[in-house]
Image: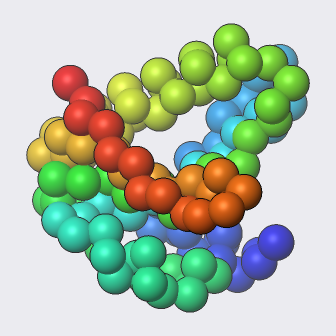
Amino acid sequence: MNKQFYDEMLERGRLIPFFHQDKLVCLFTFYITDDETPYIQADPWMAQDDNPDGRICYVSQLLTLKENFKLAFTVWRRFKVYIKTNFPNVHQISWRRWNGEITRLYKKEIR
């Protein structure tokens, strides 16, 4: 883990921790943008500038406990509510996921 990266993302308001019963269960880092390409191609440990008025929330990192799938869905819903409340222009969340062979970009409209 890169403490400097996480400190900077926290300072920028782009790091969201989620707790359950005093236990850290999930950590999101994200950017608000109109184009996720620069973030996909960038060094994942270098905090980048973003556009707070953008229409896309690009999830840079998602660290989560996988012990409780129901809790994971709850955290995902809470994250979407946080994004819609704090970034009303955002209409899409995108993220990358490695499936063992390739990395795919996923996109989901949020309402």
Q: Residue furthest front?
A: 101
Quadrant in the picture for residue 41: bottom left
Q: Does 12 sit above or below residue 92?
A: below
Task: Left or right? Give the position of 77 relative to 17.
Answer: left
Quarter that holds the N terminus: bottom right
The answer to whether residue 92 shows anywhere in this view is yes
* Rendering coords of residue 86 (x, y %): 29, 41
Number of callouts: 0
Quadrant in the picture for residue 83: top left
Task: Left or right? Give the position of 78 relative to 83.
Answer: right
Quarter that holds the C terminus: top left
Residue positioned 77% across, 77% down in the render: 2
- How is the rendered protein coloured? rainbow
Q: Does 15 sit above or below residue 79?
A: below
* Rendering coords of residue 81 (x, y %): 37, 26
Residue positioned 44% across, 75% down in the render: 40
* 102 or 38: nearer the viewer: 102
* Rendering coords of residue 7 (x, y %): 65, 71
Q: Does 35 sit above or below residue 110?
A: below
* Rendering coords of residue 34 (x, y %): 17, 65
The answer to whether residue 49 shows anywhere in this view is no
Residue positioned 55% across, 63% down in the render: 103
* 38 or 102: nearer the viewer: 102
Task: Left or right? Give the position of 24 relative to 85.
Answer: right
* 25 or 108: nearer the viewer: 108
Q: Does 88 sit above or below residue 32?
A: above
Residue positioned 68% across, 12% down in the render: 70
